[in-house]
Image (cartoon, coloured by chain):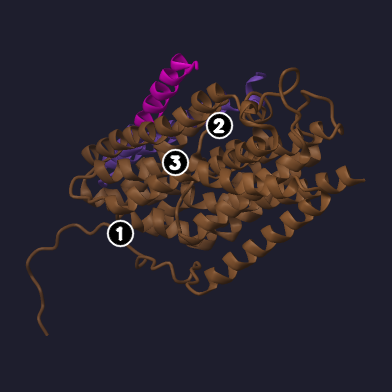
Chain colours: A purple, B brown
Amino acid sequence: MMVNWQAFIVVVVAAIVAACLLVTLFSTALRVGDGAAPWRRLVAVSLYVLCGLVVCFGLYLIVPALHGG
Amino acid sequence: MDIMLVVALVIALALFFDFTNGFHDTANAMATPIATGALKPKVAVAIAAVLNLVGAFLSTEVAKTISGGLIREGDGGVRITPVLVLAGLIGAIVWNLVTWLLGLPSSSSHALFGGLIGAVMVGAGFGAIDGGVLVSKILIPAVLAPLTAGFVSFIATRIAYTITKKRERDNFKIGQVFTSSLVSLAHGTNDAQKTMGVITLTLIAAGLQPTGSGPELWVIVACALAIAIGTYTGGWRIIRTLGKGITDIEPAQGFAAEVATTATILASTNLGFALSTTQVASGSVIGTGVGRKGASVRWRTAGRIALGWLITLPASAVVGAAAAFVAGLGLWGVVLDVVLAAAAILVIFVRSRRSHVDHRNLHLPVPGKFVRPKKRKTVAVR
């Protein structure tokens, strides 16, 4: 019985990194955006955009058709 | 002519299974946003349906695990006949509907594998099942997946609560819409594949398709549609269990849980692991319940769910085996199987009407701010 432990470790690490990255970005965006100062708005929006980019990158990796895999 | 009838029945049953898979799994993506009021129920299932449809077209990795590996085929192996697939599907469908009636988020994947395994064991003997593949590709991931998701969700929840202040957390509702959409997409890439794999396996076994070929376009379209329609139909009982039954979920938790679910599912789909999205999603919900300070997890419910997971594979195997035994009696056996299955489905459906749950009586939260900051002590007394 062979379990592909290497693949499993990759899955766990990838999941942790991806999830934590996304949650950190979004939470920080919420925290920073709390207030009236204009710089807050700017930073918050850019963080949201970063979230979107991370998600797009993930989708690009996952979907074979997108990266010619 | 016999074989064509059986193949037609298999395709019909497979698509029906796909439909049950759809409504069984809507909860995985949409229970948390519905519970926090981030999405209205009907809107939630509509989004889930569309994204499942899209996701189904995006990837075919998982389909190959079904047709290859689990059941030894070819030399020294067994001929998997459409009749056995039919029996297996009956096992899967019946068990899926029973767990739906009980509001238990159980794994449709395990129901499918179990049904097939039970049918093959009766039809072709124990040696037909590759035990190594069973353990390494199905049983072990089944234990590891919810644990991983729970762990990831726990960390994500802690991060979310550490970084944000109380009054900011209501805005996680917006994030929830996106993360739940991602889960639906991920689900589409993972689950519709299984039915595609089964139908393709049957067509190959009946000689209508060359061995080793992938799913035909009409199969992909039909399976995608079946799961999407099933998703839209709702599975409200299971939504209630996942959204309220395990722990009371706040928007930040819903967000963290769905991010964890998406990350785990997408990471493993990439490697062709046929994961149970239900077990991952439930693991995430439990993990987030543990992660928020002051939250309590109803371990009794969690225990019932875990028990459901343990018995799904054997239970559907038993039904599949029984169906295979009946089907083995000849063409009349096959017809009898389908009639009995239809009767069981009808009984379950009638039984469910007694305690009908739909989008109207889910006990939804009052719309508006979900997380209220502490009020000062000025209470007006009338």
Q: Which mark is residue B216?
A: none
Mark 2 lies on residue:
B274
Residue A57: x %, y % from top left: 52, 26
Task: Please state the chain letter of the residue tagged with numbered disc 1 in the rendered image.
Answer: B
Tag 1: residue type?
Answer: Phe
**Looking at the picture, does residue B336 appear above or below residue B128?**
below
Q: Is residue B39 visible?
A: no
Residue B302: x %, y % from top left: 33, 49
**Looking at the picture, does residue A4 appear above or below residue B54?**
above
Mark 1 lies on residue:
B370
Which quarter of the figure is the C terminus of chain B placed in? bottom left
Residue that protrudes farthest toward the bottom in the picture: B382
Crowd rating for badge 1 (residues with CA inside 10 Å; few <14, some 14–19, many 20+): some
Tag 2: residue type?
Answer: Ala
Task: Please state the chain letter of the residue tagged with numbered disc 3 in the rendered image.
Answer: B
Give the number of the mark in front: 1 or 2: 2
Choose the circle earlier in sequence order: 3 or 2: 2
Q: Which residues are magenta?
A: A1-21
For the stretch drawn in magenta, the main secondary structure is helix
Residue at position x 32%, y 44% from top? B286
In front of the other: B1 or B38: B1
In the picture provided, is B10 more to the left or to the right than B143? right
The answer to whether residue B101 is magenta is no
- Tag 1 near tag 3, CB within 8 Å: no
Mark 1–mark 2 distance (CA, rounded to whole Å): 36 Å
Task: Please state the chain letter of the residue tagged with numbered disc 2 in the rendered image.
Answer: B
Tag 3: residue type?
Answer: Gln
- Discs 1 and 3 carry the same chain letter: yes
Mark 3 lies on residue:
B279
